[in-house]
Image (cartoon, rainbow, N blue to C red):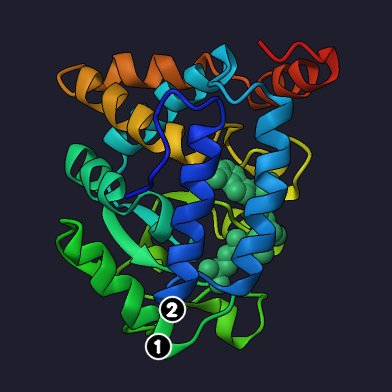
Amino acid sequence: ELDIPESHPRYESLLTRHRIEAGVEKGITSKQGLIAEGRGEAFDYLLGERTLESAETAERVAAAHLLLADRPVLSVNGNVAALVPGEIGELAAATGAEIEVNLFNRTDERMAAIASHLREHGAGEVKGLDADGRIPGLEHERAKVDADGIESADVVLVPLEDGDRAEALGEMGKTEIVIDLNPLSRSAQVAAVPIVDNVLRAVPNITAHARELDEESDATLEAIIAEFDPNAALQAAEQAIRSGDLK
Ligand code: PTJ
């Protein structure tokens, strides 16, 4: 899809930009999504554009949560749809989670475009279009969710979420798994499981862990979750940035 050799040192970053640009052209990604991407890239650069060991652990814990959940939901916005449309479908299939489109800048056109984009990439049912549920404490458009989706979910994966909504979902008593390259972002700080990694790497990693943990007992999954310390994960990421050791 991109005319650059995979050996190019900035291949992944160029591929990401290309996908986000194409997302904007297709009416999937918002213009603000371009800004969010730039911010994410800066953090990814400082993290050495790799999955930290602490992030790998968090990805395994996220898989355990999704497998144990009664009603897990993967929330998808315009950036996630552009970057990992097929990988989200695979994660849903590996964990039995629902997929719901949930936008910061919600328009009917983008909702529909994202839902069909996900289905073109192999997703089954895509929720979010009914909008018959609400997240309390948020203004109208951003509060809209499906009653049988995010509103009644027990575990929600929210990649690249904004801080307000991450906080409001936490207040609803949901277990939140947040993927965000900025360890200081409010969403990462309020998450039960903060994953400081690029969605491009994080989503397939969670899927791989879910497949590996699929046959494990509830007790084993619960033990994996109990050992996890979200603050230690955030500190490890911040430390990696501060150390300036890019490789
Ligand atoms: O599609 P919509 O309307 O729902 O809008 C989505 C965006 C992302 C535009 C909206 O939620 C937004 O404005 O988000 P923020 O407040 O810019 O936050 C985005 C966060 O995601 C920042 O902390 C970035 O560092 C981080 N981020 C950006 N790209 C990636 C990322 N984290 C992981 N992987 C990425 N590829």
Q: Quadrant of the C terminus?
A: top right
Against 231, residue 67 (above or below) is: below
On the image, numbered disc 1 is attached to which residue? 109
Disc nearer the start of the sequence (2/1): 2
Relative placement, left or right, of 202 versus 89 is right
Q: Position of residue 146 (x, y in %)?
A: 36, 75
Q: In whole angstroms, how far apart are the C-alphas of marks 2 and 1?
A: 8 Å
Relative placement, left or right, of 196 versus 43 is left
Instruction: Name the one closer to the observer, 9 or 204.
Output: 9
On the image, numbered disc 2 is attached to which residue? 27
**SS class, disc 1:** helix
Relative placement, left or right, of 94 versus 201 is left
Residue furthest right in the image: 242
Relative placement, left or right, of 96 versus 224 is left
**Is residue 127 at all visible to an observer of this figure?**
no
Q: Is mark 2 within 8 Å of ligand 1?
A: no
Q: Residue at x 49, y 35 (%)?
A: 12
Q: Residues within 10 Å of mark 2 (few under 14, many from 20)?
A: some
Q: Position of residue 186 (x, y in %)?
A: 75, 48
Against 234, residue 159 (above or below) is: below
**SS class, disc 2:** loop
Q: Residue at x 29, y 72 (%)?
A: 115
Against 102, residue 65 (above or below) is: above
How many marks the image carries: the answer is 2
Q: Position of residue 3 (x, y in %)?
A: 38, 45
Instruction: Name the one closer to the observer, 73 or 174.
Output: 73
Instruction: Name the one closer to the observer, 205 or 177.
Output: 205
Q: Residue at x 59, y 56 (%)?
A: 161
Quadrant of the image occupied by residue 53: top right
Q: Are marks 2 and 1 in contact (CB under 8 Å)?
A: yes
